[in-house]
Image: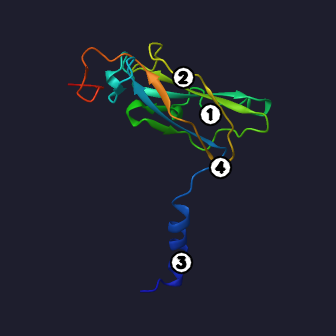
Amino acid sequence: MTPTPAAWPLIALLLFGGGCVKIDGGAVEISWVVRSTSGSAITDCSCADPAIDKVRLKLVAIGPSIQDNKSCAGEAQCDFPCQRQTGSTAFDVKPTQAGESYEISVVAVGVDGTELEGVMTPAPILRSVSEGQPTEVEAFQLVAPCRAECVMNGSGVCARP
């Protein structure tokens, strides 16, 4: 069956209008793993001590043209559920110019929304950001003790019994 000429605008709208993403800068994609202080995997973020609810992306601008970047300053878009182990900002991170970069880091966040000081995180990583492009960062490793009510199973994973 061939569509009528009156249907073509609707078909074009469905094909080309439905998958648009607003691009007003670049994006930053992160991933993480949680390990115990003994090096074992923690697959349930509530088994970390203290329990990790979210992982917060932090961006610190280094350079004059990006100093006013507020992409992750207190923004919910930069808090990701810990269990997901990955997260990405919208395409609204101000692009860097030559000689500029962002310090990209993560912090663990508790159920009450406060940053957890008992969870070790790595030093920031320097990256540039390009308009319309995702900036990928190697996986961050968060380290915390295994919570007492969780146990190391036969595979050496800190998990709920």
x 46%, y 32%: residue: 32
* Mark closer to the observer (4, 3): 4
- Picture quadrant of residue 112: top left
- Picture quadrant of residue 135: top right
Q: CA distance from mark 4 to mark 3?
A: 30 Å
User: Dot 1, crowdedness within 10 Å: few (<14), some or many (≥20)?
Assistant: many
User: Dot 4, crowdedness within 10 Å: few (<14), some or many (≥20)?
Assistant: some
Kindly check if marks 4 and 3 are in contact, taking CB atoms under 8 A apart as contact: no
Identified by mark 3, the residue type is: Trp
First in residue order: circle 4 vs circle 2: 2
Element under disc 4: loop
Element under disc 2: loop
16 to the left or right of 142: right
* Mark closer to the observer (4, 2): 2
Question: Vertically, is 18 above or below 62?
Answer: below
Q: Name the residue tied to disc 3.
A: 8
x 46%, y 37%: residue: 86
* Mark closer to the observer (1, 3): 1
* Mark closer to the observer (3, 2): 2
Q: Quadrant of the N terminus?
A: bottom left
The x and y percentages for residue 60 are: 66, 26
First in residue order: circle 1 vs circle 3: 3
Q: Name the residue tied to disc 2.
A: 122
The x and y percentages for residue 96 are: 73, 38
Identified by mark 1, the residue type is: Ser
Question: Vertically, is 25 above or below 65?
Answer: below
Q: Name the residue tied to disc 1.
A: 71
Q: Name the residue tied to disc 4.
A: 132
The x and y percentages for residue 108 are: 46, 22
For the residue pair 40 and 106, the one nearer the viewer reads as 40
Q: CA distance from mark 3 to mark 2?
A: 53 Å
